[in-house]
Image: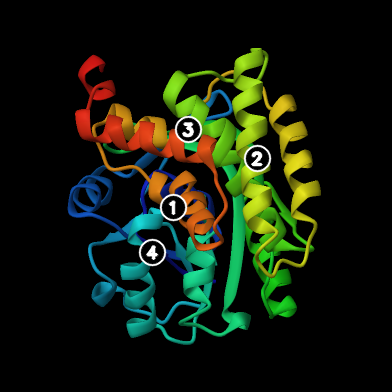
Amino acid sequence: MKVVVQAAGALGLLIAWFLHDKNDVVCVSRKRLVDVVSKDGLEVKFGGGNEKKMLKMVESADEVEFYPELVILACKSYDSDENLKIIKEHWPETRIMTIQNGIYTEYKALEIFKREQLFPASVLIGSKFIGISRLEQFFDYGMKVGSLGDSEFLEELLKLLSESNIRVEKSDNIMRDKWQKFMFYCSSATINALTATRDLSYEHTRWIVKRALEEIAAVGLNMELDFDVELLAKETFDFCMEFKPDVWNASVGVDLRKGKKTEIDYLNGYVVKLGKRFNIDVPVNETLFRLVKTLEKTGLFAKFI
């Protein structure tokens, strides 16, 4: 299959690395990555081993020499608007797999593309740079992928991912799964970003996560969702209780420690925005949001790296 990974960072490059052997894959990424990976290849550390592959890298969608059957949108949520416009301009009829942590990108994409073009993915695969041309996959809980309208292509996509040794599961309700990941990231992952806590064994951590999830459910009750959002919050809390990775570096925390902009506006910040829309107080989510924004401003975490 002809695949473009648009705005490829750590996770996008990892997916491209897996797809590389059996597909025609091009990664659109920033200049520094393009220059180094084009020259040296991309080495990935996973499962106790290392392997290098020579990926096709370009700086702009203008440089892609084919019309892709699939575009994997791999940007951060705050760059979704810009990159969705690029896809619309260059490949208006392609299929798009979205892999962002939040739910903003899918709702935005529905304003621009037809439902049958969209294949959201809920991804729980940890990928980080350990060098300019080296990645480490530090945990792998796989991904769930679903369709908003084209079940036939979904089967092709699932086969594509599975045959590329990506752990994948078909979702019967992908927006429910995206909401669950959104809830997970707004609660446990934000706590991990701020405190490096990897599980909910501490009572005060459990309290924060539980209250954050209850607030998100309260907001969701005011939206036209085709699932029980309160039940989902309880299931997410149970998942958080069981989630005990040996290594965990939530992306918001990684960005804070690098002194970079985070996606918090599209995670807890999005909950705050929805809360204001529906006149619902979300104090725990707002506190987590404002703490991260303050650390973005001060750069405190980055000073200790």
Query: Do the residues under discs 2 and 4 have CB atoms within 8 angstroms?
Result: no
Q: Nearer the viewer, mark 1 or mark 2?
A: 2
Q: Earlier in the sequence, mark 2 or mark 3?
A: 2
Q: Eyeballing the image, is 141 above or below 115?
A: above
**How far apart are the two marked residues, 4 and 1, measured between alpha carbons?**
10 Å
Nearer to the camera, 216 or 184: 216
Residue under numbered circle 1: 266
Image coordinates of residue 108 in percent, x first then y, are 47, 71
Type of amino acid at the residue the image marks with label 3: Ala
Query: Do the residues under discs 1 and 2 have CB atoms within 8 angstroms?
Result: no
Q: Nearer the viewer, mark 3 or mark 1?
A: 1
State the image quarter where residue 293 is shown.
top left
Residue under numbered circle 4: 80
**How far apart are the two marked residues, 1 and 2, measured between alpha carbons?**
16 Å
Residue lying at 44% horizontally and 28% vertically, measured from the top left: 193
Q: Nearer the viewer, mark 4 or mark 1?
A: 1
Type of amino acid at the residue the image marks with label 4: Ser
State the image quarter where residue 257 is shown.
top left
Q: Eyeballing the image, is 187 above or below 265?
A: above
Residue lying at 24% horizontally and 22% vertically, measured from the top left: 300
Q: Earlier in the sequence, mark 1 or mark 2?
A: 2
Nearer to the camera, 288 or 282: 282
**How far apart are the two marked residues, 2 and 3, measured between alpha carbons?**
17 Å
Q: Nearer the viewer, mark 2 or mark 3?
A: 2
Residue under numbered circle 3: 250
Q: Nearer the viewer, mark 2 or mark 4?
A: 2
Q: Which mark is residue 213?
A: 2
Image coordinates of residue 13 in percent, x first then y, are 41, 49
**How far apart are the two marked residues, 3 and 1, measured between alpha carbons?**
15 Å
Q: Judging from the image, what secondary structure is the residue with disc 1 in?
A: helix
Label 2 Cα neighbours within 10 Å, binned few <14 / some 14-19 / many ≥20? many
